[in-house]
């Protein structure tokens, strides 16, 4: 049990559907957790899943004051639970990536002079020029994406600069749309924040800087120089640098909490605010991903996180600045056809039995005797294809496979795709590489065995419940000592280690090294045959893809 006066570190997560917090002590023990569910606990805002989907079905927003009121409610809950805020030495947090907050002129002065006798949402009700913030789910800025691609010299060139092609949910394109369609609201805007830097601003009592990592999910930051890209900024809005402020390293200590928090909740004047970041970068910190590691979240959608040193940005996937090491990068890939597709094949091939599904994987050989399958039940993000495409050992299309062969074709095909697209972004298997598995399917050891074989690396499981919160709390602690202890991993070495589950078979490298090349050729053929319209699928936040 922690001593009554032991230091605490808070990690907040402003996700799409809820606001969460975790408090840890200096030994990394979680001593408090709390949350506010937007839909059920703040019904006056009438959100569904934390958002408003507008009549055009493309525009998706969230009320800014809902986030502020949620923070009021959360702090009251924490106080009611007996949390001693005077023990908090530092706090940090994360926000759903790509969302934007537009502060009205005069908001800076308001933030600096908050009355501790009033709730935040009362004090800030007139501080936003846009009352409903665009979120990552918004897909109404296709025209602005096209304009940005043209200005940058094409999608490939934009990807080289910013780490991603233009996505409709990304902040820069939403800023451009607002400037063009609602010029008066844009004219009275004093500052533009990401959800993460907006949240940090509430604690800081002034406009918080955007950090490198979350900033690289805007289609505006040059990920190599870590400065705003002049060509992207000019294409988005005039003098945009004044509205965004200068980006800062993700480990930056932005300053002390404002006097509002000291007087209203009893925070120490010495409590520091460490730069907030996006939910995906914060989850990378929560999973304690290291150089060479790959994390695979096996949920409704499958998400792949990578720590990479030399990125090769591609039209699929995203490369961000690494939140833990400013010289490194992180990459993220999202695959829409994950657990629901696995469940469909389980139902059709093994009568709904996971036991028989697992037995099929055990009873079929590595490489599946040359049978390969592509299973895109719905339009895939990576690659942009749809439909089921099955191939025999001679690369001839077939209409069906036997039940056991189909189970392995599905699982091998999914993991070959994950590895292929990870390598295209710069991932390379090196000695010591670990695969960290999480999400619902990570409880199935036979599925993990295929994952281990395809990646030719040991697979570990890790409990990442509230990973963005936990990563934010770790980052708060690291931010305080980052000048004296260079490595984030020195700070979190007391955290529980991932558990080794499976190791690859000796023949895996030879089998899948060859199979990966064949898979890549067949994927290109599938793409040419299906020729779907190019999607503008926004990046999925970790909270939405990790459904079990």
Image (cartoon, grey):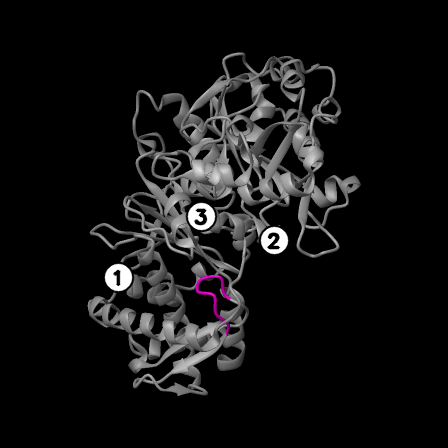
Q: Which residue is mark 3?
A: 463
Q: Residue at x 41, y 87 (%)?
A: 398
At mark 1, the secondary structure is: loop
Observer-side mark, 1 or 3, equals 1
Mark 3 packing: few (<14 Cα in 10 Å), some, or many (20+)? some
- Determine whether label 3 and label 2 are within 8 Å by CB: no
Nearest the camera: 367 or 30? Answer: 367
Q: Is residue 384 magenta?
A: yes
Q: Is residue 251 magenta?
A: no
Nearest the camera: 284 or 10? Answer: 284
Q: Position of residue 336 (x, y in %)?
A: 51, 62
Mark 2 packing: few (<14 Cα in 10 Å), some, or many (20+)? many
Q: Quadrant of residue 251?
A: top left
Q: Quadrant of residue 221?
A: top left
Q: Which residues are magenta?
A: 380-386
Q: Position of residue 158 (x, y in %)?
A: 42, 48
At mark 3, the secondary structure is: loop
Side of 178 relative to 47 (left or right)? left
Distance Cα–Cα, label 1 vs label 3: 22 Å
- State whether residue 488 is above or below residue 385: above
Q: Earlier in the sequence, mark 2 or mark 1?
A: 2
Distance Cα–Cα, label 2 vs label 1: 38 Å
- State whether residue 490 is above or below residue 422: above
Observer-side mark, 3 or 2, equals 2
Q: Which residue is mark 1?
A: 456
């Amino acid at each position: 049990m922690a001593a009554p006066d032991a230091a605490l570190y808070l990690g907040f997560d402003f996700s799409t559907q809820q606001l969460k917090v975790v408090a840890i002590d200096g030994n990394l023990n979680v001593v408090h957790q709390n949350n506010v569910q937007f839909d059920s606990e703040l019904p006056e805002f009438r959100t569904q899943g934390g958002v408003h989907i507008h009549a055009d079905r493309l525009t998706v927003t969230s009320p800014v004051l809902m986030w502020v009121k949620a923070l009021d409610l959360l702090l009251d809950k924490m106080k009611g639970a007996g949390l001693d805020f005077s023990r908090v030495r530092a706090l940090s947090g994360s926000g759903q990536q790509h969302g934007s907050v537009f502060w009205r002129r005069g908001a800076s002065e308001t933030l600096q002079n908050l009355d501790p006798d009033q709730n935040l949402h009362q004090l800030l009700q007139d501080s936003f020029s846009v009352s409903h913030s665009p979120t990552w789910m918004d897909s109404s800025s296709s025209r602005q994406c096209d304009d940005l691609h043209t200005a940058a010299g094409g999608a490939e060139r934009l990807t080289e600069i910013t780490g991603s092609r233009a996505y409709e949910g990304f902040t820069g394109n939403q800023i451009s749309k607002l400037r063009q369609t609602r010029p008066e609201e844009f004219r009275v805007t004093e500052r533009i924040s990401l959800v993460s830097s907006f949240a940090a601003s509430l604690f800081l009592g002034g406009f918080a800087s955007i950090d490198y990592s979350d900033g690289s999910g805007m289609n505006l930051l040059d990920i190599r120089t870590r400065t705003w890209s002049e060509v992207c900024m000019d294409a988005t809005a005039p003098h945009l640098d004044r509205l965004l402020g200068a980006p800062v390293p993700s480990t930056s200590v932005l300053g002390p909490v404002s006097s509002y928090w000291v007087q209203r909740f009893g925070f120490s004047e010495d409590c520091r605010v460490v730069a907030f970041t996006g939910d995906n970068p914060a989850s990378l910190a929560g999973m304690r991903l290291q150089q060479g590691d790959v994390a695979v979240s096996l949920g409704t959608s499958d998400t792949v996180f990578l720590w990479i040193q030399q990125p090769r940005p591609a039209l699929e996937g995203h490369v961000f600045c690494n939140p833990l090491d400013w010289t490194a990068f992180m990459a993220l890939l999202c695959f829409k056809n994950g657990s629901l597709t696995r469940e469909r094949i389980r139902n059709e091939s093994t009568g709904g039995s996971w036991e028989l599904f697992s037995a099929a994987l055990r009873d079929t050989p590595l490489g599946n005797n040359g049978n390969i399958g592509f299973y895109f039940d719905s339009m895939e993000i990576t690659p942009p294809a749809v439909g089921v495409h099955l191939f025999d050992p001679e690369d001839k299309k077939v209409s069906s496979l036997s039940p056991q062969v189909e189970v392995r074709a599905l699982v091998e095909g999914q993991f070959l795709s994950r590895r292929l697209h990870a390598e295209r972004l710069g991932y390379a298997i090196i000695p010591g590489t670990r695969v960290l598995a999480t999400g619902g399917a990570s409880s199935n050891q036979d599925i993990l065995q295929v994952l281990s074989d395809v990646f030719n690396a040991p697979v570990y499981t890790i409990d990442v419940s509230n990973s963005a919160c936990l990563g934010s709390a770790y980052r708060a602690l690291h931010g305080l000592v980052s000048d004296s202890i260079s490595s984030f991993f020195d700070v979190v070495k007391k955290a529980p280690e991932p558990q080794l589950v499976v190791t690859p078979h000796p023949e895996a490298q030879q089998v899948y090294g060859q199979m990966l090349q064949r898979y890549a050729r067949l994927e290109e053929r599938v793409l040419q045959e299906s020729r779907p319209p190019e999607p503008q699928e926004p990046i999925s936040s970790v909270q939405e893809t990790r459904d079990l």
